[in-house]
Image (cartoon, grey):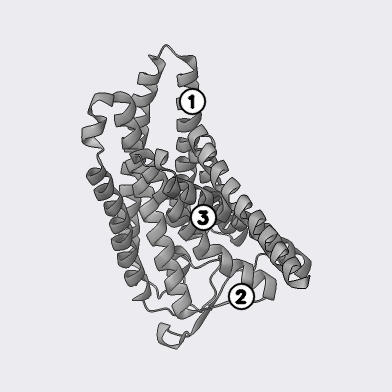
Amino acid sequence: MPNSSSISEFLLLPLADTRQLQLLHFWLLLGIYLAALLGNGLISTAVACDRRLHTPMYFFLLNLALLDLGCISTTLPKAMANAHWDTRAISYAGCAAQIFFYFYFVSAEYSLLTIMSYDRYVAICKPLHYGTLMDSRACATMAAAAWGAGLLNSLLHTASTFSLPLCQGNVVNQFFCEIPQILKLSCSGSYIREVVFIIFSVSLAFGCFVFIVVSYVQIFIAVLRMPSEQGQHKAFSTCLPHLAVVSLFLSTASFSYLKPPSMSSPSMDLMVAVLYSVVPPAVNPLIYSMRNQEVKDAVRKVMTKCVSKAVNGRFFEFMTYNAAFY
């Protein structure tokens, strides 16, 4: 069997067996990808351009949208290219880069979601201290810490995984490179260190999840004391979907990374990977932002400006052409 020094590329899992289904999967993934780009791109532009949204909550939403863009752009373009061109290959360096960037964005996003739950907790449960605890310097420091934690975590896991000797072939049973599938290709007994790192990371993620749940429990208790039913509905409609997406991501990712090899099958691994790698970046714009009236107003303003500029540009070109013609 080949070792890691002789492997120049990996073979990813095809999305379908027939050409027609491959093209169908290509168009489906393209639609999801474009929707994620549009949603997260509009949110990023709206928050950056509208001064009314220059607050801690929307600052974190901007960072979340950027992380979602990076996360989904790491996996789907290569999967779409393979489905469209009927190929499976990804280079050794490309596989390592995919694992590094995906782990980077996901780790940073999960840290940011924890920070966002703390922001909502302070805003609702300690409103008198919000200006002090969540000033611009504190927000920038927490956001930088989330990005930095993601970078360190990604460097650790990528270096540990690709330092292993690979002697079980080069077939990755997943539509993108992920650590559990690479570990299956390593020589027997050589992956214990990376397994320990994974267990440690999952434990930290579970600790963050407990913090998120406790924060929202405190928020729900405070919200139930509000006399306004409209305020209660707004808080619950935002917080409950947040918890649902975080729970979906953590449960499916933990299952994918910690399940024993005997429970593994290509179809199940593919479905679980889609749930934690594709669904959250695609639905986060709807859950965190598009349900917010302020963000919807800002997005509408951005789209109106873009349409107005496009129409005015076309009109100017038309008038210039007519003037030159006559």
User: Disc 2 or 3, which lies upstream in sequence?
Assistant: 2
Q: Residue at x 38, y 14 (%)?
A: 225
Instruction: Give residue 217's position: percent from left, percent from top.
Output: 36, 26
User: Disc 3 or 1, which lies upstream in sequence?
Assistant: 1
Q: Residue at x 51, y 28 (%)?
A: 237
Give the distance between the C-alpha atoms of the residues marked 3 and 1, in whole angstroms: 28 Å
Q: Residues within 10 Å of mark 1 (few under 14, many from 20)?
A: few
Give the residue at mark 1.
234
Q: Is residue 250 above or below residue 210?
A: below
Q: Is residue 73 above or below residue 238?
A: below
Q: Amino acid at mark 3?
A: Ser
Going by the image, does 291 lie left or right of 106? right
291 or 256: nearer the viewer:
291
Give the residue at mark 2.
88
Q: Is residue 196 visible?
A: no
Give the distance between the C-alpha atoms of the residues marked 2 and 1, in whole angstroms: 46 Å
Where does the C terminus fall, quadrant-wise?
bottom right
User: Picture quarter containing residue 158?
Assistant: bottom left
Q: Residues within 10 Å of mark 3 (few under 14, many from 20)?
A: many
Q: Residue at x 51, y 55 (%)?
A: 277
User: Picture quarter containing residue 265?
Assistant: bottom right
Give the distance between the C-alpha atoms of the residues marked 2 and 3, in whole angstroms: 19 Å
Q: Amino acid at mark 2?
A: Arg
Instruction: Give residue 104's position: percent from left, percent from top.
Output: 38, 61
User: Picture quarter containing residue 196?
Assistant: bottom left
